[in-house]
Amino acid sequence: MLEKLLGFTLVLTRISAFFLILPVFGWQAIPMQTKVALTVLLSLFFATIAPIGIDLTGVSNLSAVLLLASEAMYGLALGLIIVLLFSVIKLSAHFVERQMGLTMAHIIDPLTNEEGKPLSNLLEMIFVLLFFGVNGHHLFLLIISKSYEAFPVGTVPTIGVLTGGVVSASSAMFVASLRLAAPVLAAFLVLMVALALLARLVPEMNILFISMPMRMAMGLIMTSMFLPFVNGYISEMADWMAKFLPL
């Protein structure tokens, strides 16, 4: 009986750590009762099918604590990698907002109850809707299932494998963000060159006064053209998850 209880606790620990940091499900907008109920329900399900990687008979208290810590570390690493890949859209929007002159614009993000930027929050919400529209939440369940196939209950990857996945996901986040924002940044570069030439040709014109509305208009136009790439990033993100996640 104690072995079954410890096995369920290990499953609950990995899934709880995973959902604690996971995008969407870890946001404060979702009630805590819903999070707890979802975590317990999934833990009950996976506890019945997940294989046990070690013999839990006669496990000491210290060993049990170490097993729980290992499961929590593994779950947090899985969730952190997904968070990094999920943040690509928001980070690329930050690059565009800086060019538009919206660095001082702050709003309260209703999903996280934290300060955010208007354009990045809008693109993040659109990305979340597109992600759920293609049943992306099924991918999270698949990741949990694959994690127990690769590393059964009581076994976790080495620290090097976990940190390597997180570092690789961090590098991919910055590369993908710059790649997605590159066309917009190139358009702003052309606009700045045109304004500089206009300032030389018409010195009496107040370039600072006319540049702000032009930058805002350029940002909105390029953002609307940027939306199809947001949808295309979903499949690319799934490929990166399969590559970076220690499964």
Image (cartoon, rainbow, N blue to C red):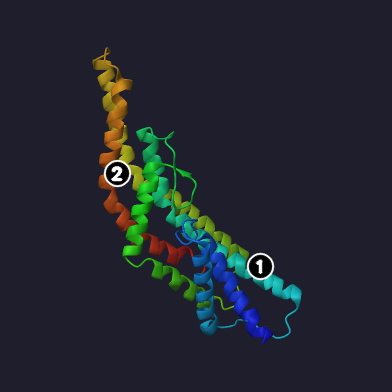
Q: CA distance from mark 1 to mark 2?
A: 43 Å
Q: Residue at x 36, y 40 (%)?
A: 96
Q: How many numbered marks have been drawn onto this rendered protein structure?
A: 2
Residue 36 or 152: which is nearer the viewer?
36
Specify whether residue 154 is in view.
no
Image coordinates of residue 61 in percent, x first then y, are 75, 75
Q: Identify residue type, mark 1.
A: Ala
Q: Which residue is mark 2?
A: 223
Q: Is label 1 in a helix, a strand or a loop?
A: helix
State yes or no: discs 1 and 2 in contact (Cβ < 8 Å): no
Is residue 151 depicted above or below 178 in this figure?
A: below
Among numbered discs 1 and 2, the one appearing first in the sequence: 1
- Relative to 169, say whether 192 is above or below: above
Q: Residue at x 28, y 50 (%)?
A: 227
Which residue sits at x=30%, y=57%? 231
What element does badge 2 sit on? helix
- State which quarter of the image contains the N terminus: bottom right
Query: Left or right: 161 with respect to 225?
Result: right
Where is residue 53, by image quadrant?
A: bottom right
Residue 71, quarter of picture: bottom right
Query: Toward which corner of the image does residue 16 lie, by quadrant?
Result: bottom right
Q: Residue furthest top?
A: 204
Which residue in the structure is indicated by mark 1?
69
Which amino acid lies under the numbered mark 2 shown in the image of this protein?
Thr
Give percent across and percent down for residue 153: 59, 78
Q: Answer left or right for 90 relative to 232.
A: right
Mark 2: few/some/many CA within 10 Å (<14, 14-19, 20+): some
105 shown above or below 67: above
**Nearest the camera: 208 or 113?**
113
Q: Is residue 74 visible?
A: yes
Which label was assigned to residue 6?
A: none
